[in-house]
Image: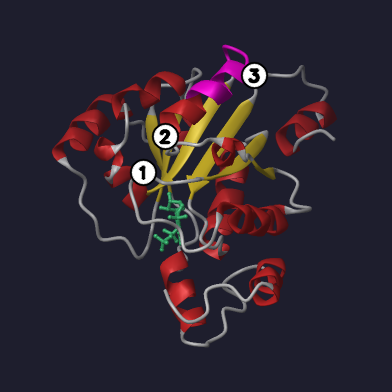
Amino acid sequence: MASCAARSRAELNQAPAVRRVGIFGGTFDPVHIGHLRSALEVTELMGLDELRLLPNARPPHRDTPQVDAQARLAMVQSAVSGVECLSVDARELGRDKPSYTIDSLESIRAELGGDDQLFLVLGWDAFCGLPGWHRWEELLQHCHILVLQRPDADVEPPDELRNLLAARSQSDPTAMSGPAGHISFVWQTPLAVSATQIRQLLASGKSVRFLVPDAVLAYIEAHDLYRGSN
Ligand code: ATP
């Protein structure tokens, strides 16, 4: 089936252009409406052919996820099932080593055409932590970076990022040209939801209905996840 942007091009009788692929990595422990609404809005704003949610196996920058990779993957898959432009990329879950974003970007880039545009989507908090990432200075060789506002984030960017922003940022995300190399900001519906909050609600026996899709809620309940700790 043709993807959203590809189909609108077909409807307009336009020749296939370069592909525009977004990658949205995360622990997704569990996936929630903050992730999903952002994913959808960035896809529409940027006219992406596809936005892939990329669950991390063993995130190098944070605590071990509370729920195993298979369950987190199942929840993300159920969340995007039937949502045309959103898909799941499980490549990091097959690796027996920490999930380094640079490795995923290199492998995804190798599967795309040289002119295809690759966009790494990061929340503001994740972006501010970038200088701690493995080979972070190489990321922009493979992709553009789209930074999402995060209403509950109060993090300041470190100096290395201020310098990078001065050199590489572009005010209009939809005007980013070329396959890689620029940074821009995307302002979407602010939803101050976090997986931490969801785990805490569940641990204290409260409902997370409407904070996660119904299919994710059903999975959490069926497998009795996140009960009793956070
Ligand atoms: P936790 O509370 O466990 O740290 P989280 O809710 O931040 O989890 P992650 O899986 O760590 O979720 O996030 C994946 C990506 O989604 C990150 O880039 C993060 O900044 C972004 N993100 C998470 N929640 C939101 C939200 N409500 N709005 C916008 N971006 C978000």
Taking the spot 74% from the left edge, 38% from the top edge, the residue there is 4
Q: Which mark is residue 100?
A: 2
**Where residue 26 appears, x then y in whole percent?**
48, 49
Ligand 1 lies under 8 Å from the Cβ of mark 2: no
Q: Where is mark 3, residue-wise? A: 18
Whether residue 125 sits left or right of residue 96 in the image: it is left
Question: Secondary structure under badge 3?
Answer: loop
Quarter of image, ligand 1: bottom left
Q: Main secondary structure of the magenta part?
A: helix
Whether residue 82 sits left or right of residue 24 in the image: it is right
Q: Where is mark 1, residue-wise? A: 60
* Camera-side mark, 3 or 1: 1
Structural crowding at the residue carrying mark 1, measured as other residues with C-alpha within 10 Å and reported as few (<14), some (14–19) or many (≥20): some
Residue nearest the viewer, comparing 132 with 150: 132
The disc, 2 or 1, on the residue closer to the chain's N-terminal end is 1
The disc, 3 or 2, on the residue closer to the chain's N-terminal end is 3
Q: Is residue 74 above or below residue 195?
A: above
Whether residue 28 is visible:
yes
Q: Quadrant of residue 169?
A: top left
The boundaries of the magenta stretch are: 106-115
Under mark 2, the amino acid is: Tyr
The answer to whether mark 2 and mark 1 are in CB contact below 8 A is yes
Taking the spot 42% from the left edge, 34% from the top edge, the residue there is 100
